[in-house]
Image (cartoon, rainbow, N blue to C red):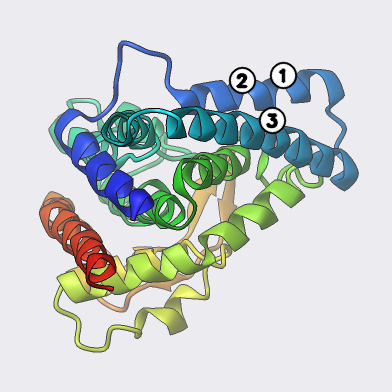
Amino acid sequence: MTNILIAFFAYFIDRVFGEFRFIKHPVIMIGEIITFFEDRFYKNSIFRGLLLVLFVLSLVSFMSISICLYLGEMNYVLNIIISSSIASMFLAHRMLYDSVKEVLVSQNKKEVISMLVSRDVEQMSESDIYKASIETYAENLSDGVIAPLFYLTLFGLPGIIIYKAINTMDSMVGYRNEKYENYGKVAAKLDDIANYIPSRITAVIIMLILGQKKIFSFYKNGKQHDSPNAGHPITAMALGLDISLGGDTYYFGELKKKPYFGVARKEIVDADVKKALLIRNKVDAVVAISLLALILTLQAL
């Protein structure tokens, strides 16, 4: 019950206030821990990458469990308020929404989209930029919203913080390039495992919100993505918007062959991005109603 209450209020805080810009973001602190280890012990080997994961997760687990135990000694209401405020910093729906929306209104769309994706932006057409925006929103609904809530609800503050540590390691070292091919492998695999269930929950939510009757039809196309998870919410969004996402994309100067997700129009326009962003309120409603239903069910038991 406590975890669900914290999840509900954390989601509300993120919706209303977004990022707390007056303090250093805890994800930045996690990133500094990862960099600290890499600067001193980097070697492009799987074993050294395993040591990174063990080091980061041990430190983050100790800190998050200690915080949780300390807050548990407080008055219950105060515990909920502080825990919810901390948890909200690991949710990113408002920041994600605002960042993608900025692509639509910016005079320099390539600069804005470069902050959101790792692909090369110099050769992007306007359609490519809008496609990347929609893919970013769909994929990060899982990584930045549903997955953190999933682990917060199950395991409380330590759950959401440890999840974000895994996710941050993957975003920093989980690349298939010369530097990180081996060093980042354990972090990348762990992130795949952590996101397996949340990514599919996200895809189902998108399908339901966008009125798709065959709510699991995303799976066949979605599993063609290099990631075992990212393709599912992206495909769900493509099917719901009646467009095709994916396709060949340049990364670090090299063309990467990628399948298309969805079977409809490939030319993406600004109206498609706007339609994707319109699901925000419905996603928030689904989350809020689901958490309230869990609270009421537990109270009735």
In space, the residues marked 3 and 1 are separated at their CA atoms by: 12 Å
In space, the residues marked 1 and 2 are separated at their CA atoms by: 6 Å
Q: Secondary structure at mark 2?
A: helix
- Residue type (three-letter) at the residue carrying disc 1: Phe
Residue behind mark 3: 59
Residue 232 horizontal side relative to residue 191, left or right? left
Rendered residue at 81%/44% (across/down):
50
- Residue type (three-letter) at the residue carrying disc 2: Glu
Q: Is residue 238 visible?
A: no
In space, the residues marked 2 and 3 are separated at their CA atoms by: 12 Å
Near-viewer residue (45 or 299):
299
Of badges 2 and 3, nearer the viewer stands 3
How many residues crowd mark 1 within 10 Å: few (<14), some (14–19), many (20+)? some
Q: Secondary structure at mark 1?
A: helix
Near-viewer residue (192 or 217):
192
Of badges 3 and 1, nearer the viewer stands 3
How many residues crowd mark 3 within 10 Å: few (<14), some (14–19), many (20+)? some
Residue behind mark 1: 36
Q: Please, is residue 249 above or below residue 161 in the view?
A: below
Q: Which mark is residue 32?
A: 2
